[in-house]
Each structure stands twice: as C-alpha cells, then as structure tokens.
Image (cartoon, rainbow, N blue to C red):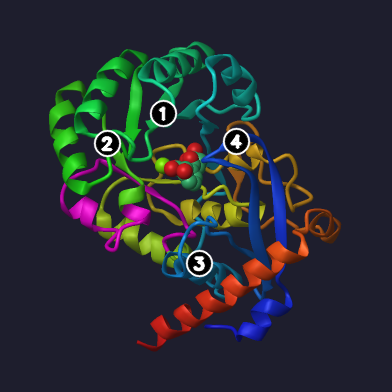
Amino acid sequence: MLPELADLLSTSRVVSLPMTTRFRGITVREAVLFEGPEGWTEFSPFVEYDDTEAAAWLHAAIDFGWRATLPPLRDRIPVNATIPAVEAEQVASILARYPGARTAKVKVAEPGQTLADDVARVHAVRDALGPEGRIRVDANALWNLDEAEHAVHALAPFDLEYVEQPCATVDELAELRRRIRYMGIPVAADESVRKAADPLAVARAGAADVLVVKAQPLGGVHSASRIVAAAGLPAVVSSAIDTSVGIAMGAHLAAALPELEFDCGLGTVAMFVQDVADEPLLPHDGAIPVARPTVSSARLDALGADEDRTAWWLDRVRRCYRLVERSRAL
Ligand SMILES: O=C(O)CCC(=O)C1=CC=C[C@@H](O)[C@@H]1C(=O)O
Ligand SMILES: [Mg+2]
C-alpha cells in the first residue's frame, strides 16, 4: 500500500550522523526516517544519486514501514567487518569495532592509492584475523580488466573469499571470471546488481558467482528477495551505510533468504560516532540481531540535520514520491 505523501512527511525526521572514518568519500551520513504502521523505516540514497535511482530507495522505505516484512528464518545475521581504504596501521583499530567478526571486507583500488597500498592493507587484515579469517576485497568497479587480473594475482596469497565488483561492466566481469577461474577465487557483483537497469542481467550472463544485494537500492525487502530467488546465486546482504533503521531492513532481508552461506555486510553501524537507536544494531559476537531497533526521540533531536539540509531532503522525498506513485500506476 502506498501511504499518502502527507503521512510520510508528517513523521519524517532528517538526521546527520558523523562517521568515525571517511568511507566512500563521506564523513557524515544523512538519512530521512519515517514512522509507518510497521515501525521506523529509512530513506537514504547517497546525495549524488538522481531521482530515478533514489526512487527505488523510497520504495524500499515504504515497503519496510507500511508492509509486513517477510517471515524471518533466523534471528541473528553473521556480519563482516568493513575496512575502508585506510593505512595498514589503522586496520587493527577498525577491526576492533566488529567484535567476533571472522570475515573482513577490504576496500581496494581507491583512487590516488597503489596496488602496494592494497596489498599492505590486506596483509594487515590477514595478520589480524589469522588463517581462519575470511577476506573479501571490494574494488567498486575501479579496475580495468588487466588491472583486475594483476591485482587478484597480487592479493591471492592472502586467500580471498571473493573479489567484489572488480570491473565495471558485465562483459568485463565475465571475462575476468574466466581468466581467474583456475585460481578458485569467485567474483561477486554489487554495482552490476544495484545500479543496473536489469539487476538480473549479471546472473543471466554467468558473469558472477555471488550477488551482493542491498535492500534500499533494490526497492526493499520483498523486491530484493525476489531478485535473489530469480538469480539463483548465493547472496550477501550488505548495507548502504544506513542508520540502525536501514540496517534492520537489511537484516530482515537476510533473515528471509532461504540460504545464507556468507557473512553479511551489515555491521556498518560501527562506522558511526552516534546512531539513532538506543540499542544500535552493532555487531556483537560477529553478528547483529534481526530486530527493529527502538528509535530514541532524544537522539533524533540531537542528530537532527540543519534547516537547509532538512529542506533539501524533504524536497527529494516529494520528487521521489511522485516517481514511485507513477511507477505503481503503470
Ligand atoms: O558490505 C559491507 O561490508 C559494507 C557496505 C559497503 O561496503 C558499501 C555500502 C554502500 C556503498 C558502497 O560503496 C559499499 C559497497 O560498495 O559495497
Ligand atoms: Mg561493493
């Protein structure tokens, strides 16, 4: 059911959360929270996204706030630590924010850095996790095919669980997968799912072994779970650097998937200095609970965005609402 725009806006709260470490170029994460009949929900497309892309995120927010979620098949979700493109010396202190995590996802291919920086960072993660730890790397589509092949060779000695979105296109992923198959390192698709016109194209092309899925960009828990089912590939549910409210949406998606063989990228509340919930969905014993956190009004007040940013976000909600309304009418 599509709530009235006035209903959405009447409970909206725009928040601005300071982060402990720069991640994907930001140090402050902004989000709009709404309280629907099912509980609190979140709309937080990255600020540079256009309205067409952001509309899927509003669809997701409405889905989680106004429609009963899918029945959970588990009550806790094992999570990975997320290591930004930091100096190797910082790795141990970042890992410490993810107590009990046996898996780390390490950002690589950061503009302005070198492969040697990536090797040093991944090496530090392997040293910290020990031989039993699982390490995946995420290049966010920033390598070309040859760079990706070279980098996978350089990083393979640290034993990679998979390499996430090494290159930009589905064709490149398919070719890289072919080139590195003998090494036994799977290729995961992220941007090729969440930013593609057709999120299933990468699976259909046989270009990935694993899908990384995020609830907000894929239109919400129901639509993301349908995409996973149709793709027929193992899925890793990951965050969009959401507040605890958006992370709860991801946790409900992960909880509803019939198979969950990989740890999920849902530990990222650990990146915030403060969160909107009294009991933030932070990792404990390597997992987060499947729950809707209680949002504190004192925290919403303390973390409230200023007038200009609030107006900017609410305008965005209005524009995206029109797009969601139109797509439903089709
Ligand atoms: O998957 C994780 O460990 C955390 C989430 C994460 O890494 C990301 C969230 C949102 C945008 C991204 O640049 C990034 C990713 O590419 O997976
Ligand atoms: Mg990714």
Among the two numbered marks 1 and 4 on one chain, the one whose residue lies closer to the N terminus: 4
- Left of 197 or right of it: where is 32? right
Q: Position of residue 152 (x, y in %)?
A: 27, 23
Among the two numbered marks 3 and 2 on one chain, the one whose residue lies closer to the N terminus: 3
The residue singled out by tag 2 in the image is 187
Among the two numbered marks 1 and 3 on one chain, the one whose residue lies closer to the N terminus: 3
Q: Magenta segment, principal secondary structure?
A: loop
Q: Secondary structure at mark 1?
A: loop
Q: Residue at x 37, y 34 (%)?
A: 139
Q: Which one is in front, 79 or 92?
A: 92
Q: Secondary structure at mark 3?
A: helix
Inter-mark Cα distance, 4 to 2: 26 Å
The residue singled out by tag 4 in the image is 22
State which mark lies toward you, 2 or 1. Answer: 1
Kindly tell me whether mark 2's CB lies below 8 Å from ligand 2. no
Inter-mark Cα distance, 1 to 4: 14 Å
Which residues are the magenta region? 193-218
The residue singled out by tag 1 in the image is 108
Kindly tell me whether mark 3's CB lies below 8 Å from ligand 1. no
Rendering quarter of residue 199: bottom left
Q: Position of residue 88 (x, y in %)?
A: 53, 16
Rendering quarter of residue 310: bottom right
Q: Residue furthest right?
A: 298
- Contact flag, marks 4 and 3 (Cβ < 8 Å): no
Q: Name the kind of residue labelled 2 in the image.
A: Val
User: Can you tell which mark lies on residue 60?
Assistant: 3
